[in-house]
Amino acid sequence: MQDRPWFKDWFNSPYYHQLYFKRNEAEAAHFIDQLIDHLKPAPNAKILDVACGKGRHSIYLSKKKFDVTGIDLSEESIAEALKCETENLHFYTHDMRLPFWINHFDIAFNFFTSFGYFQTPKEHNNAIRTIAQSLKNNGSFVLDYLNPQYAEAHQEKPFEIKIDRVNYLITKSMDKTHFYKKIMVEDQSLDQLFIYNEQVAKFTLRDFEMMFYQQGLQINEVMGDYNLSAYDVVKSPRLILIATKK
C-alpha cells in the first residue's frame, strides 16, 4: 500500500485545477438541471455535494435556492470555495471515509467519478456509509460514475494538452481492477518535471448494488448519460445511480 495516497498531492496541486478547470461547464449545468427536474426536491432542500472540489456545482445548486453543503479532502480547494460561502452555501474540509452530519440531508450528490480512489474495499464502503448516514430516511443519493465496460472499449491513446506555459502529457492504461492515468507536467517556468498518477476502480453496477445494500441504500434507477438516458452496459458512457435510503 502506498504511504501517501495519490490524491492527497494531486488534488491539492495547482496543476490539477489548471488541467481540469475548463471542463465543460455547460454540460455540468445541463446535467444538474436534468437531475433537479427529475428528483423535484422541495424548496430549500438540504443538499450534500460529496467531493465538491472548489465548489462550482455547489454554487450552481445554491443559486437554485437550495441549502447546499460541500465537502472535499483538498484544503486548497475548500479554501477557494469558502470565498463563495453564503447563508445557504457551506463548505468543509472533510474526508468522505469519515462520518459527517447524521440524518441531515435530503439529497447527496457525488459528481463526475469522484469516487473509486481508495486502496481497500473497507475504505470505499466507509465512504458509502458516510453518505448513507448523512441522509434523512427516504433521502436520495445520486452517484455519477464512469461505465467501466464502455471505458475499456474506448481507451484513449496518449495525448498532449498545453495550457498557458504548461504542457501535459497524458497516458491512460488499465488492468483487471483499475483504470490509470499518468500525467507528466512540464512547466516552462520551472526546471523540474512533475509526474502525477490517477487511479480509479473498475466498479460495476453489481459492485455498487452490493455496497449500497450494505448501507441501507436501495437503487431505484440506473442511467447511462447526462441526458438521463437508460443505462446500457456496452453503449453508455456513464453509470448514474439514483438510490433511496431505507
Image (spheres, helix red, strand yellow):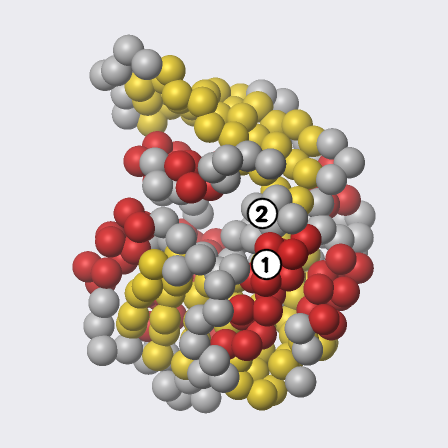
User: Residue 192 location, x and y as percent?
Assistant: 32, 14
In the visual, does 161 lie left or right of 89? right
Q: CA distance from mark 2 to mark 1?
A: 17 Å
Q: Which mark is residue 182?
A: none
Q: Amino acid at mark 1?
A: Asp
Please give the name of the residue rendered at 49% of the width and 84% of the height, measured from the top-left corner. Answer: 103
**Residue 166 shows up from this direction:** yes
- Work out whether residue 220 or residue 154 is closer to the camera in this orientation and state it: 220
- Work out whether residue 196 or residue 60 is closer to the camera in this orientation and state it: 196
> Is residue 89 shown above or below 167?
below
User: Residue 183 location, x and y as percent?
Assistant: 48, 26
Question: Residue 17 appears in which quarter of the rendering?
Answer: top left
Please give the name of the residue rendered at 42% of the width and 41% of the height, measured from the top-left corner. Answer: 8
Sequence-first tag of 2 and 1: 2
Which residue in the protein does label 1 denote?
A: 144
Q: Amino acid at mark 2?
A: Phe
User: Residue 30 location, x and y as percent?
Assistant: 48, 62
Please give the name of the residue rendered at 34% of the width and 59% of the height, measured from the top-left corner. Answer: 93
In the visual, does 236 lie left or right of 48? right
Where disc 1 sits, the SS reads strand
Which residue in the protein does label 2 denote?
A: 118
Where disc 2 sits, the SS reads loop
User: Residue 160 location, x and y as percent?
Assistant: 47, 21
In the visual, does 203 lie left or right of 74? right
